[in-house]
Image: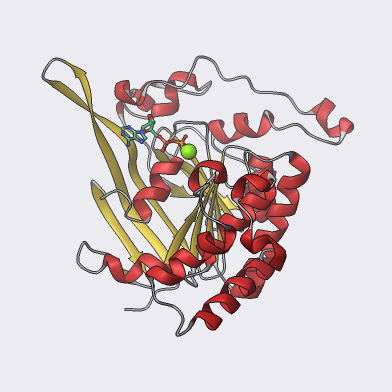
Amino acid sequence: MSSEYLVEVKDLKQYFPIRTGFMKTTLLKAVDGVNFGIKPGETLGLVGESGCGKTTVGRTLLRLYKPTGGEIYYDGELITDQNMIKYRPKMQMVFQDPYSSLDPRMTVEEIIGEPLDVHKLYSNSKERREKILGLMELVGLNAEHATRYVHEFSGGQRQRIGIARALAVDPRFIVCDEAVSALDVSIQAQVINMFEELQEKLGVAYLFIAHDLLVVRHISDRIAVMYLGRVVETADADELYDSPIHPYTQSLLSAVPIPDPNIAKSSKRIILEGDVPSPLRMPSGCAFRTRCRFATEKCSQECPSLTDRGNGHMVACWNK
Ligand SMILES: Nc1ncnc2c1ncn2[C@@H]1O[C@H](COP(=O)(O)OP(=O)(O)O)[C@@H](O)[C@H]1O
Ligand SMILES: [Mg+2]
């Protein structure tokens, strides 16, 4: 079966059983019915406050967790327990914290060489070394770096090592989970530029996860906004920033600092009331209603689904 999407998820669910007392467990619905598709060479940004389920979407999509429900397709083919091993190299992940995801006892060469060894991607040691050096060059590291250890590098360089490692198996899709969030703003821009250059050169698609909307706008073709396990709005990146419709997206955007003081003066900050509810005590109906200025009776009774407001701008809200 062919599909316009490289990666597609349909009604993806991930529930974690949590012990809430003696002999009592409650299901924490970390991801509860998420749908999206990512075309080859495209970037989908996934944003939302901490704890809304972004990492769980990424990990479940890569089958690092078995999904509680829903389907994951790669190139139009359903990924199952039986065939998932075939897709492992095609889909990789880059983490927020290269300090903890890279082994401190290994040299850069060993770190990047490991996936090449695992998947037997060379025929002799000369070819192995050439591949490693090629990957290092691709991410902007020098050949002299090959014999050094991770602790000898800055945060941005460590992230480059992590990316080279992910690229070693020639993936077509990479989940970047807060991949630049821990870096200084100036370094963030450099690493994001590198992600974009790699995309142009290699045609990889990204699911680019971040809590910072500014980071995501620049790199994303489309953006999905999550709130408590569900996507509440998705649109082309510029459309989402220029004309957000969901009250949650509007409040997130109003919290983003605006560099232009004239625009900043005329735009109002929308302060959200209350805290994010615990996912163990999810509000009935629309989960956002407890913090929403527009909430009505209907919002507590029924959860709205995403509906198309034109040009593929999808919003899940009864009142907007
Ligand atoms: N392995 C797990 N077991 C139990 N609960 C988890 C697990 N991973 C995440 N959660 C919970 O699922 C929710 C979503 O977490 P996460 O996906 O890490 O959110 P985000 O990446 O958006 O910050 C949180 O309430 C978190 O505590
Ligand atoms: Mg996370």
Left or right of residue 67, residue 271 in this image:
right
Name the residue at 38% across, 49% down: 59
Name the residue at 43% across, 64% down: 91
Camera-side residue of 36 and 265: 36
Residue 235 in percent (x, y) is at: 56, 52
Residue 45 in percent (x, y) is at: 56, 50
Residue 199 in percent (x, y) is at: 62, 67
Q: Is residue 178 visible?
A: no
Image-quarter location of ligand 1: top left
Residue 54 in percent (x, y) is at: 45, 42
- Where, by quadrant of the figure, is residue 229 drawn? top left
Left or right of residue 309, residue 161 in this image:
right
**Outermost residue, right side:** 262
* Colour scheme of the picture: secondary structure
Name the residue at 23% across, 46% down: 68
- Vertical relation: 64 (above or below) 257: below
Q: Is residue 16 visible?
A: yes
**Outermost residue, left side:** 23
Camera-side residue of 299 and 261: 261
Quarter of the image for the N terminus: give it: bottom left
Name the residue at 66% across, 69% down: 138
- Vertical relation: 262 (above or below) 231: above
- Vertical relation: 247 (above or below) 174: above
- Where, by quadrant of the figure, is residue 162 drawn? bottom right
Camera-side residue of 58 and 122: 122
